[in-house]
Each structure stands twice: as C-alpha cells, then as structure tokens.
Amino acid sequence: MKFKTVAEAFNFYRTKTVEEMETRAREIGKLIDTDETADIAALNIELSGIREARENLETRSSAAATLNVITGMSMEPKEKKTFGDDVLDTPEYRSAFYKNLLGQSLSDTEKTALDAGLKQAEKRADSFTSSTDAVAILPTQTLNEIISKARKQGGLLAECRSFSLPTKISIPVGTPGNKASWHTEGAETEGDKPALTTVTFDGYEIIKVFSISAKTRRMSIAAFENYLVQELTACVMETINEALVNGTGSGQGTGLLTGITWTAGANMIQTAKTTFAYDDVIKTIALLKRGYSNGAKWAMNNAMLYTSFYGMVDSTGRPIFIADPKSESIGKILGHEVVIDDNMPDHTAILGNYAQYMGYNMPEGIAVEVSRESSFRKGLIDYRALAIADCKPIVSEAFVKLCKAAG
C-alpha cells in the first residue's frame, strides 16, 4: 500500500501493534537496500507514519497505565524506555544521532537511545578505532538511503552482490550445477553434490574527514541528514565502486582487473586494434562458460560504448547494440545488458554475471565521529566517517574480457 501523506500512513497504522509496525519498518529497510526501483519518497512517508503511530501508541499506553488521582488511585512514575539490539533502526536513535552531531540538546528518551547505540559501537571496537568515546554508528534508515542512492547512480555498485557479514569468515556461494535428469522408475539414482565455492572478505578501512561551518548547529535534522547522505554517498560508496574495478587487494578491495588472472584465448580476447570487430565480440561471448550467461552483463566506460559498439553491425548488417529508450537501462549488446562505469579503462569491456559472482561487504555500516576542537580557530566542525569494507570477484570463470593489447 502506498501512502500520499504522513497523516494517511498514521491513520492506517495507529490501530496496529508495535510488533506489526516494527515488522513493516524492517520490510521497508530491506526494500530500500535491495530494490533499485523502490519509491524512496513514498517509503519515507510510510516510515514517518509508522513512527508517529508508534509514539501515539506509547503515549496512550503510558496514559492508561498512569492512575488518576481523582479516582482515588495512586500515580505511578512513567517507566523509562529501553532499547535492544535494534536500536539503530529506531526513530529515537536517529533523532538523537543527528542532534548529537549538531550539538543540540537531547530528551531523556533520546539520551537513552544514544547510549544504547554507543554500546553497539563498543561491541564493534575491533572494527572501529575511535579517538573519542563518542563514536556513533549511522542510523539504519540513513545507511539504507545512502546505499539506495549509490545504486541509483549506476556503475557496477548497482549490479554487484551486497554482503553484510563478519570479516575473515569463509562464505559458501553456489555455482551453476548439473540439471536434473530423466529417471527410469525403480532405478537407483546417484546423488549429486552441489558445486560450491567460498569467499572470504577482509576488513579494510575507508575514511573521509569533512568540515562544515559551525552554523550547522542551526540546521534542521532533515537538512543535515540530506547533506550527510550526499557526502557519504559521494565518498564512501564511490570508493567501493572504484575498487570493484581497479582495487589492488593490498590495503583495499580487489577489483575485476587485478582479481582475475586474464589469459588470452581462455577468458580474454585481446586485439591490436583500437576498435573491435563483430567477430571479436562473438569470440568473447563464446568464452563465457555454461551457466554464467543467464544474467551476464557488459561493463565498460561511456567512451567504449559509443566508439566501439555503437554502430557496429553483424554479418547481415544489423546493429549489435540496441538502445533501450523506454526503460532505465542503457541497452543491450547481442542480448546482454550494458552497464556504464567510468572507472573501467578505455578499450576494455568485461562480460560477466555481477549479480551473483562479484560482491562487496560492509559488515559494520558507517561510523561517524564529530570534533569541535580540531578546527577551533577556523570556526569549523570536523566530521569523520569510517567504514570497514572489502570487495572481490567471487568466481573468476563468471567473467570474460575483451580488450586492446598494450602498446
């Protein structure tokens, strides 16, 4: 159900239980994280309605629990709200997080939520090193918005598999297996073990320090959150996106170019020409092993698409690149969608199944720390964003490359 206003969403959820509201809030978070076509504005309206409905329910419950003196009953103090492991996904923590960064005063409930969030950060002390005792993890809703925004900007980040798993742990990933076979009634059937490979993500630090004027204290929470989303999308997520292609694997994620051993004739077609011929494209597609072709996409930079593929024709004179003006996709080359990523080098195109066999891991979200002393003389406030992340190709044989030989 899509709501046009917060009031409409509030009226729908005000009769629901807290459990039902929290379940729907988690569903929305998952939608924002995984669905590129999700209507973020409508989902935020729904989240705001859920938050107000939950606050209304808590207020009514508190009022009902408080005994009125007029009835001759004693008054009981309001019970202090507590928060569990999901504190990062609560509106109270989100409000406290931004008020704390802006130097604004917090309510008692917000202080409790922030303390619970700081305890969550302490549990992650092995991942996040802090220069103060007040490092706070980004609220879940904001992190979801950053990831969703980064995915909508295109590039390989929008195509690759996203993990949120502990570092240094081997994760099993299935590879294309044998199909089922016809069976003769009564005959013995041999068992078939699934083909699995494993991937182990390391923990590399991504740090960004940015300074803004001290007058941010007067900014609204919504305006500051929007600024932070823009800033972190541009730095943290773009760093991961660049590493997906060019990462060396030394102190940073491993990219496609260095993480796969490229061998001419085996998983690479290499020519001495600047522009490629139709036969080169056909040979490259033919190198992709069975089982990986379904869902495979071409990755290249914008110049590569329009100088090498745009206008290329097959043996009958038909263009091999078909633009797609109706949808948000760029188009297809011989049936495979095209992904434009300007981190890709010139004269290079990689065909592969990115959605299954290229991934990045950001297990601890993004931690944000504030310092009002480091730029005291300049009247600025410094913010430090820190993320632990890694990326790498999961299955090398899921990718093939077409490129120009060096020289």
Image (spheres, grey):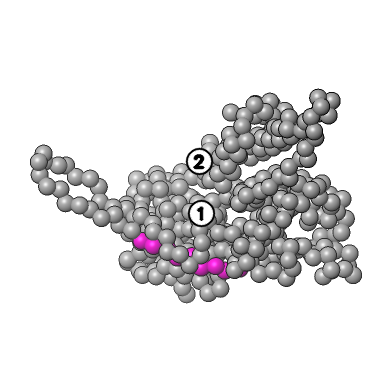
Left or right: 70 with respect to 146? right
Q: How would you classify the magenta stretch by its main secondary structure?
A: strand
Left or right: 21 with respect to 112? left
Q: Nearer the viewer, residue 127 or 336?
A: 127
Residue drawn at (41%, 51%), measured in percent from left and top? 296
Residue lying furthest front: 72
Residue drawn at (47%, 70%), measured in percent from left and top? 258
> Under tag 1, what secondary structure?
strand
Nearest to viewer (mark 1 / mark 2): 1
Q: How crowded is mark 1: few (under 14 residues within 10 Å), some or many (20 or more)?
A: many
> Under tag 2, what secondary structure?
loop
Quarter holding the N terminus is top right
Q: Nearer the viewer, residue 336 or 292?
A: 292
Give yes or no for residue 295 being in the magenta stretch: no
Q: Which of 369 and 392 is in front in this view?
A: 369
User: Label 1 belongs to which residue?
Assistant: 162
User: Label 2 belongs to which residue?
Assistant: 324
Q: How crowded is mark 2: few (under 14 residues within 10 Å), some or many (20 or more)?
A: few
**What is the spatial separation of the Cα atoms under label 1 and label 2, in whole angstroms?**
26 Å
In magenta, the rendered stretch is: 197-206
Q: Where is residue 23 in the image (x, y as percent from the top left)?
A: 57, 38
* Number of the label disc, if any, that sits on residue 73: none
Q: Where is residue 143 in the image (x, y as percent from the top left)?
A: 64, 51
